């Protein structure tokens, strides 16, 4: 099970997967070249949704297809500091 964590620091938004920086996956789609964001719906949160889903599923097409809905239903509601497990993502995607 993977653990995804996000927090805001003096250097900006930091998102990790199992303690390592989460790749933004700009190669799939550059919603926000400026980086990740959350707590609202927009380009930065959609970049985070895409990166989370791509890492979790290992399926780029599935991640792209679900990124907007996952952003609106999950990422937009994350707290300033948050944790999601693989199980949390599976449950959220099943509920979409």
Image (tube, rainbow, N blue to C red):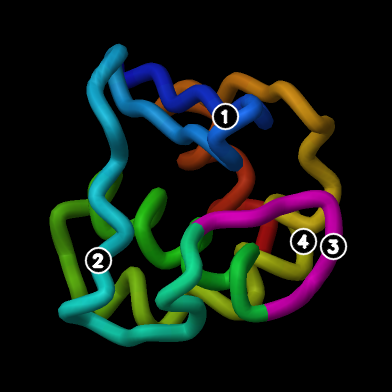
On screen, residue 40 versus residue 95, left or right, reads right
Q: Residue at x 22, y 81 (%)?
A: 28
Residue that label 1 marks = 6
Q: For marks 1 and 2, give the CA distance.
A: 16 Å
Closer mark to the observer between disc 4 and disc 1: 1
Contact, mark 1 vs mark 2 (Cβ under 8 Å): no
Cα distance in 3D space between marks 3 and 4: 10 Å
Q: The residue tagged with tag 2: helix, strand or loop? A: loop
Which badge, 2 or 3, comes first in the chain's sequence?
2
Q: In the image, which disc is placed on residue 40?
A: 3
Which residue is located at x 51 percent, y 60 percent? 49
Q: Earlier in the sequence, mark 4 or mark 1?
A: 1
* Label 1 close to label 3 by CB (< 8 Å): no
Residue 35 position in % (x across, y down) = 48, 61
- Give how far apart the Cα atoms at labels 4 and 2 are: 20 Å
Circle 2 sits on which residue?
25
**What percent of the width, then of the height, locates residue 65?**
41, 84
Q: From the image, state whether disc 3 or disc 4 is nearer to you.
A: 3
How far separated are the C-alphas under marks 4 and 1?
Answer: 17 Å
Instruction: State which region is magenta.
Output: 36-42
Residue 73's tag is 4
Q: Circle 3 — which element?
A: loop
Q: Quadrant of residue 4?
A: top left
């Amino acid at each position: 099970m993977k653990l995804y964590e996000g927090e805001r620091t003096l250097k900006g938004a930091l998102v990790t997967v199992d303690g390592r920086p989460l790749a933004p996956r700009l190669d799939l789609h550059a919603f926000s070249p400026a980086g990740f964001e959350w707590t609202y719906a927009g380009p930065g949160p959609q970049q985070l949704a895409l990166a989370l889903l791509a890492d979790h599923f290992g399926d780029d097409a599935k991640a792209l297809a679900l990124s907007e809905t996952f952003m609106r239903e999950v990422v937009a509601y994350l707290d300033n500091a948050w944790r999601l497990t693989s199980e949390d993502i599976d449950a959220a995607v099943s509920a979409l």
